Amino acid sequence: MVTIDYYLSLNSPWTYLGGPRLAAIAQRHGAQVRVKPVNFGTIFPQTGGLPLPKRAPARQAYRLMELERWRRFLDMPLTLHPRCFPTPAAKAAGLVVAAGAEGGDPLALAQAILRALWAEERDIEADDTLEELAQATGHDAPALMARASAPDIGATQDALTEEALARGVFGAPTYALGEALFWGQDRLDFLDRALVEA
C-alpha cells in the first residue's frame, strides 16, 4: 500500500483547509495516511520560519487575504480570528498520536480538532472538548485521554519532530510521498498527480 506521511500542526488553518481533500485523495488512490503531529516551535527556528505574531505586518495581512480566498473557494466554514487562537495544541497533538498508537482513527480525530478550532471556535486544549471529539470520532475517550498523557506519547511526538526536520519539513501541512515533499494544502493537486504514478 502506498503511504503518505502527513506532518501537521493542529492549530494551522491551512492544515484544516486541506484535511478533507487529503482524506478524499488518499481514499481515491487506496493510500494509507500516517498522521504525524509535530512541534513547529522546534522546527521554525531551525528552518528559517517565524511564529505568526513575529511575522511582518504585510505577511500577516496577506495571510488573512489568502484564508478568505480559500474558505470561499473551498466553501468551508472558517473563522479568521477564532477566540481560542493562538493555542499550543500540545494536548490535542498527544491525543492524535495516542489514537495512532492505539489503532484508532487519527486522521478523523485531527480534522475534528482542527474544525473545532477554526469553524466552531472551541478550546482544543480543554479536556472536555478533546474528550467529546475523541468520542465523536469513534474512540474510547477516557482511555485515549489517559493514553495521551503517557511519557512514551510525548517521546513519540519529539521523535516525529526530529524525523520531520531530517526530511526537510519546514511548514504545515506537509505531505510526504517517498522522498517528495508537498508543502501546503495548495499543493494537494501535485500530490494527487504523484499518486497516479506511484
Image (cartoon, helix red, strand yellow):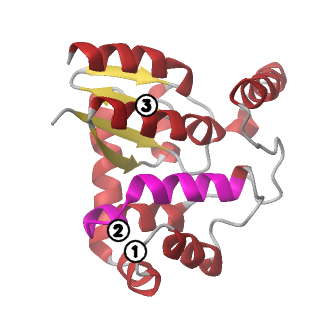
- Disc assigned to residue 98: 2
How packed is label 1: few (under 14 Cα within 10 Å), some, or many (20 or more)?
many
| Residue drawn at x 41%, y 81% as measured from the top left | 140
Residue in the picture at 74% in, 51% down = 119
Question: Residue 16: percent from the left, percent from the top?
Answer: 60, 42
Q: Is residue 51 inside the magenta stretch? A: no
Residue at the disc numbered 3: 174
Is 121 placed left or right of 127 in the picture?
A: right
The residue carrying pointer 2 sits among few (fewer than 14), some (14 to 19) or many (20 or more) residues within 10 Å by Cα, namely: many
- State the mark number for residue 148: 1
Kind of residue at badge 2: Ala
From the top left corner, tell me how far across and down residue 145 is, in percent.
45, 80
SS class, disc 3 = strand
How far separated are the C-alphas under marks 2 and 1? 5 Å
Report helix, strand or loop for mark 2: helix
Q: In the rendered image, which quarter is residue 197 located in?
A: top left
